[in-house]
Amino acid sequence: MWLRTQTVTSLKITHYFLLELFFLFFSIRYVPFLLFLLRIYLFTS
């Protein structure tokens, strides 16, 4: 019983960790792109 709850907890931790990594990667990749779009938007308006 205790082992099963430990496994579920560690799986949740791993899942959250992967989500954090994904969001970090996503933001790192798309921040320059978003800044570029913002610059275009500011220049055209």
Image (spheres, rainbow, N blue to C red):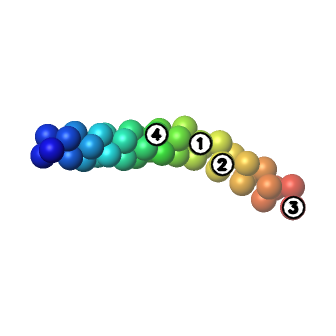
Between the C-alphas of marks 4 and 2, the distance is 17 Å
Q: Position of residue 20 (x, y in %)?
A: 40, 46
Whichever of labels 3 and 4 marks the residue nearer the N terminus, that label is: 4
Whichever of labels 3 and 2 marks the residue nearer the N terminus, that label is: 2
Between the C-alphas of marks 3 and 2, the distance is 16 Å
Q: Nearer the viewer, residue 20 or 38?
A: 20
Q: Is residue 14 visible?
A: yes
**Quadrant where the N terminus is found in the figure:** top left
Whichever of labels 4 and 1 marks the residue nearer the N terminus, that label is: 4
Are discs 4 and 2 less than 8 Å apart at CB?
Answer: no
Element type where label 3 sits in the image:
loop
Element type where label 1 sits in the image:
helix
Give the residue number, with chain letter if any, for mark 2: 34
**The residue under label 1 is which amino acid type?**
Tyr
Give the residue number, with chain letter if any, for mark 1: 30
> Residue 22 got which mark?
4
Q: Is residue 42 left or right of residue 1?
A: right
Whichever of labels 4 and 2 marks the residue nearer the N terminus, that label is: 4
